[in-house]
Amino acid sequence: MTVEPTVFVIDDDKAVRLAIKNVLESVGLRAEAFASGREFLKSERADAPGCLVLDVRLPGASGLDFQNELAAAKVEIPIIFITGHGDIPMSVQAMKAGAVDFLTKPFRDQDLLDAVQRAMERDRLRRELQTEVMEARKRFNTLTPREREVMELVNAGLLNKQIASQLGTSETTAKIHRGQVMRKMQVQSVPDLVRMAERLGIPSQKC
Amino acid sequence: MEFLRKLFSSGDFMPHGYCYLWQPALIWLHVVSDTLIALAYFSIPLTLIYFVRKRRDVPFNWVFVCFGVFILTCGATHAMEVWTLWHATYWLSGAVKGVTALASVPTAILLVGLIPKALAIPSPEALRVEIAERKRTQEDLRKAKDELERRVEERTSELRKINADLLAEIVQRNLAEEELRRSEDRMRSLVETVKDYAIFGLDPSGRVVSWNVGAEHIKGYDAKEIMGQHFSRFYPPERLLINQPEMQLRVAAAEGRFEEDGWRVRKDGSRFWANVVITALRDRDGNLLGFSKITRDLTERKRAEEALRESEEQLRLAQKASGSGVWDWNPRTGVVSWSEEHSRIFGVAPDQRDRPWKSFLQLVHAEDRTRLQSEANSALKPGGELDVEYRISRADGQVRWVVSKGRTHCGDGDEPVRMIGLTQDITERKQLEQALLKTQTELAHLSRVMTMGELTSSIAHEVNQPLAAVVMNGDACLRWLAAEPPNLNKVRESLASIIQQAARAGEVITRIRALAKKATPQKTALRIDELIFEVIGLVGGELAKHHVFLETELESGLPVVFGDRVQLEQVILNLIANGIEAMSTVTGRLRDLSIATKTTEGRQILISVRDCGSGLAPELIDHVFEAFFTTKQAGIGLGLSISRTIVETHGGRLWATANPAHGATFQFTLPLAAGAAA
């Protein structure tokens, strides 16, 4: 599968979802349309950046319910809600739950395209970040326990001498470990290592 | 042996031919003559033997045998004559002659002795004469005897006939006497035992001389006590005062007969209504012998007549009070007879009770004549019943509604002979019905508009959806056009979608207008699933707004029903709106609403709407259809009440039941259109 950004449209009204798809395709975006959330979840989707255009009024489970369902299933995808008139309270609720945008029908194509653009950008960033974290974790996994200890201490801002004293080793040994950590984590400087530790969720310890 | 040899040899003799010098002619004369004689002689004995065998009764038949032998031997001598012409066996021929002589001589001697006896045999002629004589005598005797017998027979049969006649006369006389006696007995017992008629005799002065059981029965006196009493005691006092008994006898005596209907008195003093006939009895010379009096008790009849009169009066009053007239149509004569009240309803003179069917039809409103005629015709059959509402055009210019109900009565052959029934003026009822229908229509409209008001935002959504699609497809279309090169396929697709969605929006608006319009109900053939889908098309937004999942289980190929589209859609709309409303507070389970249709055995369609909402409390089930009953904050409680009225005017039924688990089911039936296949 190509890793092309895709917009997923979920609306039970066939005419509406095909119209949205048509607009998206007219600007060269790839779009897929579904009649229900269940249909969307069942589909085989490429792991590509994308966003969801979701009708608030869905039969059975509402758009909001579906939003919760996605969160529970750890499907992280930016959601743009489409609402009719008089659905303002629902829209507010959606935004609070993390929706990136909402559009009131009938809306102009530009509003939709702008919203989609924003959501895509957001997803792209999220994915980038996610990729970095994954990479950092992969590298981190190559460290020996001792090296991990050394990395934590470096992250905490300790000097080689202090590290050696903490670990009860010589300063030379600590220096070698530190060199290994920098090499395995593929960083050039301590600030880089600290940023990576941050992505990995390693707390910076202060002595 | 020597003798025999000598006998058959010719010895030294010359054949006899030599004697004739072998002259052929002479030889042949002898040969032929002797041969013929011999043959003739041989044949005679055969004839004789035959004769003797057949007539064994002929006397002296041994003579015939002797003759036979004699002639046979004679024949043999002639044969020998022929033989000796060429063979000189003269010994043999001599021997044959000798034998002949031996046979012939005794025969001749015997014959001489036989002659006297033969002569004594009577001649046949004499015999014939004698026989004829005897026959005649016998005939005469027989004739005499027959004559005698005939005379005896004649005499005997005369006697027999006389005897039979006598006997018959005796029997006849006995029978006649018996019959007379019986007849008298019958008459007597008839008079005596008739119970329903008092038959009694009076002497010329009016005293009772005979008394039957009927008299005893009707008047209460027995024969013993009334004999010799004056008949005036049978009259009530007020009639005695004007001397009625005497007067009546006088009239009967003068005119031969008197008859009247009047009150009489029984022994016990009670009165009865009687028919009385007094007949004068006279002898041949015209002298008055007395009177016969026949009295009948008519009290029962009079009572029945009065009861009938009373009943007729009651019927007349009942007709007047109920405004219904009785009619009686004879399809054979074509005459309709009717009551006074019937005339009043039709606004015609009350005395004109009989009129031809055609003239009756003239009183019927021109537009209803054909229908009435055909209804009446189809009811004209065994067991046929008429029930028809029609208008009449009265002479005073009023058009009134009437209903005629009647039943056909048939003769023995099942042919309709009359139809009897009632006609009632239902003009006021019709007016009320029409007013009610108008009110109901208005109320239904009001309720519909209110329901739609409640659904405004959802209905708006239904219009908004296609409009949103139109706008987006339009935008996309512009982009496809602006592309380099323009994507004309996509342009075409987008435009097709725009047209389709614009049409969809138009349809929604048409439906909304139809529901909002105030129109007189019009019944047409409808497909119920079509109606359901149209309603779903209006409430789709409302369903989505309340996250209600709608399921339809519609039986395929449902027959058509006959009804008003808008009103039936209103019922379906109400039930769906109710279902959605009932589920608005439901949490923790899916909000399912199900609409199902099916045909039932009773030629009906059943439409049910099932929700899984809060349900109906048993004590509320009976009240939910009452007007102004509501469990909602905002409702005014007309929807279900009006829905029920609509369903009932369509000939169906609407009811509610609580579901076993959650919610309630509202269902209604609609009768299939006549003629629709089930």
Image (tube, rainbow, N blue to C red):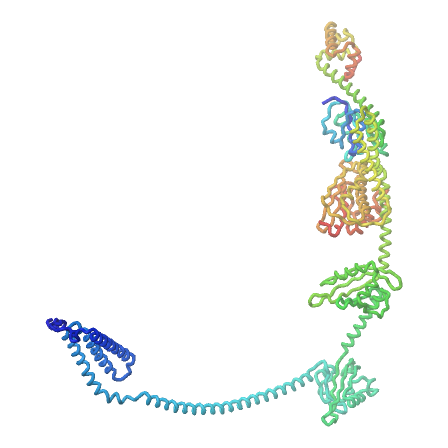
User: Could you say where residue B67 lies in the image, as x and y percent from the top left?
Assistant: 23, 81
State whether residue B275 appears in this view.
yes
Which quarter of the image is occupied by the N terminus of chain B?
bottom left
**How many marks can you see?**
0
Of B647 and B145, the residue lying toward us: B145
User: Could you say where residue B479 lies in the image, as x and y percent from the top left?
Assistant: 83, 27
State whether residue A64 appears in this view.
no
Of B310 and A185, the residue lying toward us: B310
Is B112 drawn above or below residue A171 in the view shown? below
Of B584 and B399, the residue lying toward us: B399
User: Could you say where residue A167 lies in the image, as x and y percent from the top left?
Assistant: 73, 9
Locate residue B69 relative to residue B645 in the image: left or right.
Answer: left
The quarter of the picture where residue A182 lies is top right
Q: List the single residue furthest toward the left.
A: B2
Q: List the single residue furthest toward the right.
A: B396
User: Could you say where residue B567 lies in the image, as x and y percent from the top left?
Assistant: 82, 47
Locate residue B554 relative to residue B240 in the image: left or right.
Answer: left
The quarter of the picture where residue B283 lies is bottom right
Is A48 drawn above or below residue B369 in the view shown? above
